[in-house]
Amino acid sequence: MLSARKDKGWTQEELGRKVGTSQNIISLIESGGVEASQFVLPICKVLKISPPMFFEEEWQKNWYRLGRLLREQDLGDAEAAQKMVEALLRRGSAHSTKSTDEKRPTRELPDKRK
């Protein structure tokens, strides 16, 4: 949102006026201080950008952030990207190390021979 607003040459105050809110709310949304707001969709519409994705799990958010870092190819954040990849791979391998031989609980069937 921030880069789209700046690309249009708008201040936070101008964007706020266009969607019916204050500069303070725009600032909170852009800085991540507010994850969800009734103004997010109108802001996206005015800026002609896709709405942000919201995630339930931290690992989903991390993969998204990693993708964003790689798309931006910000070499200053290469170390952060590397750490995120390593953490996600550790987490992923922890999930995939569950033995496939683990047996699920089974229900005893009644013996019909009696």
Image (spheres, rainbow, N blue to C red):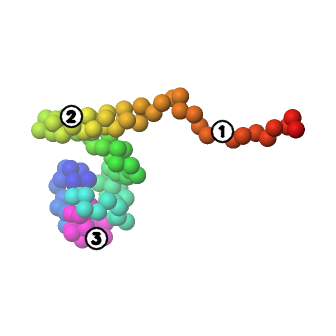
Q: Alpha-carbon distance for marks 2 and 3?
A: 38 Å
- Indicate whether 61 appears above or below 43: above
> Which amino acid, mark 3?
Thr
Residue positioned 24% across, 50% down in the render: 4
Question: From the viewer's perspective, is the residue at label 1 or at label 2 nearer?
Answer: 1
Callout 3 touching callout 1 (CB < 8 Å)? no
Question: What is the chief secondary structure element of the magenta stretch?
Answer: helix
Left or right: 90, with 27 as reference point: right
Q: Alpha-carbon distance for marks 1 and 2?
A: 43 Å
Residue positioned 28% across, 43% down in the render: 65
> Which amino acid, mark 2?
Gln
Determine whether the residue tagged by mark 2 lies in a helix, strand or loop: helix
The reply to whether residue 64 is in sight is no
Residue positioned 21% across, 63% down in the render: 27
Q: Which residue is mark 3?
A: 21
Callout 1 touching callout 2 (CB < 8 Å)? no
The percent coordinates of residue 89 (x first, y second) are 31, 33
Left or right: 68, with 51 as reference point: left
The percent coordinates of residue 63 (x first, y second) are 32, 40
Residue with the most extreme right position: 114
**Residue segment shown in magenta:** 17-29
Determine whether the residue tagged by mark 3 lies in a helix, strand or loop: loop
Q: Which residue is mark 2?
A: 82
Callout 2 touching callout 3 (CB < 8 Å)? no
Tell whether position 71 is magenta. Answer: no
Residue positioned 25% across, 39% down in the render: 84
Residue with the most extreme left position: 76
The percent coordinates of residue 79 (x first, y second) are 15, 36
Question: From the viewer's perspective, is the residue at label 2 or at label 3 nearer?
Answer: 2
> Which amino acid, mark 1?
Thr
